[in-house]
Amino acid sequence: MEIKTFSKGKVVFKEGDPGNCMYDVYSGKVGVYAAYGEPEQKLLMEYYPDQYFGEMGLLEHAPRSATAVAMENDTTVAMITEESFGEFFEKNPAKVLMVMQQMSHNLRRRTDDFVEVCRKIKELSDKEGDK
């Protein structure tokens, strides 16, 4: 497992990069952005110590869907690769539950966002149908 420290504004990974590891935040704060550096840039999530990000790339071997950026100086993260995944959780069994809880929370949040967008689309469609 590799430990890396980033200064504020440094990119941890970019959208489209290979997803070959997840990250455990040890210190500082990491922001995950859609369209990073573009006028339509949007902060999707913030991660703090004892939180994880990048797990989708590790589990799915899919390219990164967003860009992760250090939001504070001395932001330190551990890179957990497929090779170190088992050993990491053997040494830190409580963190397995933490990762699962965070993944569940993120899925619930995205599901709630999806349902809200569907509701808004239906409202707009109903208004158009009334015309």
Image: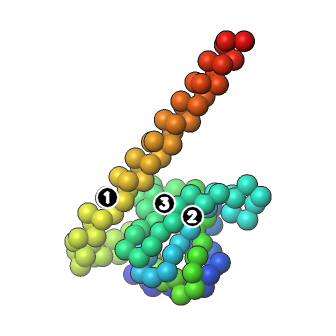
Q: Amino acid at mark 3?
A: Gly
Asked if residue 114 is positioned above or below residue 88 in the image, the reply reads: above
Label 3 or label 2, whichever comes before in sequence order = 2
Residues 49 and 3: in front is 49
Q: Amino acid at mark 1?
A: Gln
In the figure, is residue 44 to the left or right of 50?
right
Which residue does the image show at 65% across and 57% down from the upper left? 42
**Coloring scheme used:** rainbow
Q: Callout 1 environment at 10 Å: few (<14), some (14 to 19), or many (20+)?
A: few
Label 1 or label 3, whichever comes before in sequence order = 3
Q: Which residue is mark 2?
A: 32
Percent across and percent down for residue 5 are 52, 86
Q: Which residue is mark 3?
A: 57
- In terms of secondary structure, where does tag 2 sit? strand
Look at the image and tell me in which quarter the C terminus lies: top right
* Gap between marks 2 and 1 measured at Cα: 19 Å
Label 2 or label 1, whichever comes before in sequence order = 2
Asked if residue 71 is positioned above or below residue 17 in the image, the reply reads: below
Q: Which residue is mark 1?
A: 101
User: Which of the two marks, 1 or 3, is nearer to us in this view?
Assistant: 1
Tag 2 and tag 1, C-beta contact below 8 Å? no
- In terms of secondary structure, where does tag 1 sit? helix
Which residue does the image show at 58% across and 24% down from the upper left? 122
